[in-house]
Amino acid sequence: MFGIGFQELLVVLVLVLLVFGANKLPEIGGGLGRAIRNFKRAASEPDEIDVTPTDKKDKNDDKQA
C-alpha cells in the first residue's frame, strides 16, 4: 500500500489525533471529503467559457452618474 505499512499508518493517525484533537477530526474529514468530491467534479466537467458579450456602455454610464 504505497510503501506505508500498518505501523506507519497507525503512527500518522495517532499524530493527527494529538495535533487536531478528537473534536476536530469529523470536521477535517468532512472538509477533505468535500474537497475531493469538488475536485473530481471539476476535473470531469468540460471547461466552460462564457463568451456572451457584455454591454460596457451601460456600465460606464452608471459610474459617471
Image (cartoon, rainbow, N blue to C red):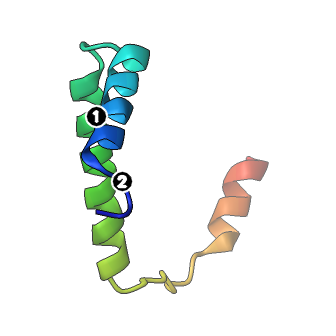
Label 1 to label 2: alpha-carbon separation: 10 Å
Q: Say few, some or many: other residues with alpha carbon within 10 Å of mark 2 (under 14 / 14 to 19 / 20 or more).
A: few
Q: Secondary structure at mark 1?
A: helix
**Amino acid type, callout 2:** Ile
Image quadrant where residue 44 sits: bottom left
First reached walking from the N terminus: tag 1 or tag 2: 2
**Where in the figure is residue 52, as x and y percent of width and height?**
49, 84
**Residue drawn at x 55%, y 83% as measured from the top left:** 53
Tell me the SS state at disc 2: loop
In the picture, residue 32 is in which quadrant? Answer: top left
For residue 36, which numbered disc appears in the image?
none
Tell me the quarter of the image containing the N terminus: bottom left
- Label 1 is placed on what type of residue? Leu
Task: Estimate the x, y position of residue 14 in percent, counting from the top left.
Answer: 32, 24
Compared across the picture, whether 51 is left or right of 61 comes to left
Q: Nearer the viewer, residue 1 or 59?
A: 1
Is 20 above or below relative to 37? above
Q: Is residue 47 left or right of residue 57?
A: left
Which residue is the site of mark 2? 4
Residue annotated with mark 1: 10
The residue at the point 73 percent across, 50 percent down is: 63
Where, by quadrant of the figure, is residue 2 drawn? bottom left
Question: 41 above or below 22?
Answer: below
Residue drawn 30% across the image and 39% down it = 7
The residue located at (30%, 69%) in the rendering is: 40
